[in-house]
């Protein structure tokens, strides 16, 4: 009971911190350099989107342009420098958010998450328009996403937010994170959405066995454990839970090779298989 009491007492503080960070006078100084995505990472993402016959992670790495893997270290260094200036990356969508608010045309659905959400724009561009917008940022953990929830979701007044996050916590992108901490961060997002009249679609993490950053680590046990907790959280909070795993996983519980070139991110065929369940769910929740 003490843990639950502490959790509920922390939520207003988290919301206040997010709101404060989103205020114009408190926002980091954003420029074209620190607001844009890294071109090398964009190239790797595009390599992962087009369906190709790649049997395993090693084959995907071999198919990357010369020097791409060597540049990963530089990408990690750049990401660390960016986090030092703007840890939740509020700059990334600040200009686009300002344009939405200035137009007065509020989106119906916002997709919030990490690279799997961000890459959705490449994998299924027809899904997004003025009423359905994407606020994914590659590499982000749930702690970072939580701190930009007010700016990138609440302030834009959507009817629904689709949340998918957690795999970068498992990968340790911003340090070790427990399963419970992942759930707590997502719980806080749900609390903020509910407090502002926004309906929630909570998505399970997509399946994965290995990834470039952790080629020898089996991600399946933790992904399954956290997804189980997220399903329980959705039931407790009475929000919609959506799980794309049955249509994406192979018999071993890894991402089917034909649907994810790098073993973690859906390619265009993977996103296409996700679309019918997504469309059916949004039709029920957003109307």
Image (spheres, helix red, strand yellow):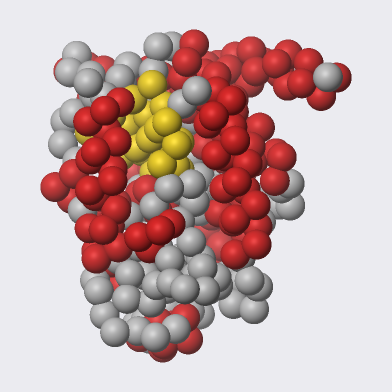
Q: Quadrant of the C terminus?
A: top left
Left or right: where 280 falls relative to 232:
left
Question: Where is residue 158 shown, x and y percent of the image?
Answer: 31, 21
- Res 52 quadrant in image: bottom left
Image vertical order of residue 5 relative to residue 137, above or below: above
- Res 142 quadrant in image: top right
Which residue lies at the image location 66% right of the left edge and 32% below the top edge?
A: 184
Residue 219 in view here = yes
Left or right: where 203 falls relative to 226:
left
Which residue lies at the image location 39% right of the left edge and 72% below the top edge?
A: 256
Question: Where is residue 114 shown, x and y percent of the image?
Answer: 45, 48
Which residue lies at the image location 57% right of the left edge and 39% below the top edge?
A: 230
State the residue in front, 45 or 164.
Answer: 164
Question: Where is residue 235 shown, x and y percent of the image?
Answer: 54, 29
State the residue in front, 119 or 218.
Answer: 218
Question: Where is residue 245 shown, x and y percent of the image?
Answer: 43, 57
């Amino acid at each position: 009971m003490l843990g639950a009491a502490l959790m509920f007492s922390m939520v207003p503080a988290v919301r206040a911190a997010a709101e404060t960070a989103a205020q114009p006078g408190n926002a980091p100084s954003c420029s074209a350099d620190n607001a844009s995505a890294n071109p090398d990472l964009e190239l790797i993402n595009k390599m992962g989107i087009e369906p190709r016959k790649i049997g395993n992670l090693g084959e995907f790495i071999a198919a990357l342009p010369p020097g791409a893997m060597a540049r990963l270290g530089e990408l990690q260094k750049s990401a660390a420098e960016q986090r030092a200036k703007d840890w939740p990356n509020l700059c990334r969508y600040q200009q686009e958010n300002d344009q939405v608010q200035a137009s007065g045309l509020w989106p119906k659905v916002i997709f919030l998450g990490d690279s799997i959400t961000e890459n959705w724009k490449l994998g299924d561009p027809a899904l997004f328009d003025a009423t359905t917008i994407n606020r994914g940022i590659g590499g982000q953990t749930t702690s970072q996403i939580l701190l930009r929830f007010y700016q990138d979701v609440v302030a834009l007044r959507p009817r629904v937010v689709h949340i998918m996050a957690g795999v970068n916590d498992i990968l340790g992108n911003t340090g070790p994170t427990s399963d419970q901490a992942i759930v707590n961060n997502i719980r806080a997002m749900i609390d903020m959405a509910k407090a502002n009249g926004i309906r929630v679609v909570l998505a399970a993490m997509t399946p994965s066995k290995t990834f470039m950053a952790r080629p020898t680590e089996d991600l399946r046990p933790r992904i399954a454990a956290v997804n189980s907790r997220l399903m329980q959280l959705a039931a407790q909070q009475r929000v919609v839970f959506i799980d794309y795993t049955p249509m994406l996983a192979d018999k071993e519980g890894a991402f089917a090779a034909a649907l994810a070139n790098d073993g973690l991110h859906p390619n265009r065929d993977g996103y296409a298989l996700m679309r019918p369940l997504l469309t059916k769910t949004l039709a029920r929740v957003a109307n």
